[in-house]
Image: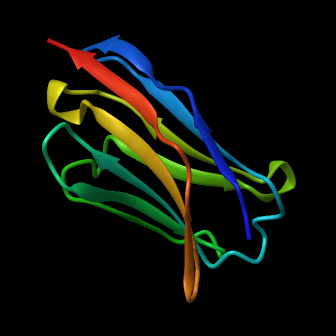
Amino acid sequence: QVQLVESGGGLVQAGGSLRLSCAASRSIFSINFMRWYRQAPGKQRDFVATITSGGSTTYADSVKGRFTISRDNAKNTVYLQMNSLKPEDTAVYYCNADMGPKNYWGQGTQVTVSS
């Protein structure tokens, strides 16, 4: 079991940057997949990025080249660096720990990008 707490969201102008953090309650060293998702009002929750325990990364096409996911195992934290933000990036961003048969979610952090 793991508790996840996201932080770093806020209001930013288009073209700006934010860095989201996801702090875990236990070591993430052995967690194979850590992911970020986002959910805009009235829409389904969508995949944003994955980082594996080995450091491999995958991104949704909509954020490729603008967002970077990283993990600091010593701090039990996963990050999402978001650059060149667009109004369509506005959403609640959720951290996810994929531990095989069980998935754990944080409470989310709001990101609002103004035009």
**Residue at x 51% of width, y 51% of height:** 69
Count the labels in the image.
Answer: 0
Q: Quadrant of the N terminus?
A: bottom right
Please say if 52 is above or below 46.
below
Q: Quadrant of the C terminus?
A: top left
Query: Is 18 displayed left or right of 115 in the figure?
Result: right
Q: Nearer the viewer, residue 26 or 56?
A: 26
Q: Nearer the viewer, residue 57 or 98?
A: 98
Query: Is 115 displayed left or right of 17 in the figure?
Result: left
Q: Residue farthest to the bottom? A: 101
Q: Position of residue 91 (x, y in %)?
A: 28, 35
**Residue at x 28% of width, y 27% of height:** 85
Q: Position of residue 84 (x, y in %)?
A: 29, 27
Query: Is 108 displayed left or right of 87 in the figure?
Result: right
**Residue at x 69% of width, y 75% of height:** 31
Query: Is 94 displayed left or right of 112 in the figure?
Result: right
Q: Position of residue 83 (x, y in %)?
A: 37, 30
Quarter of the rendering containing residue 52: bottom right
Q: Position of residue 26 (x, y in %)?
A: 83, 60
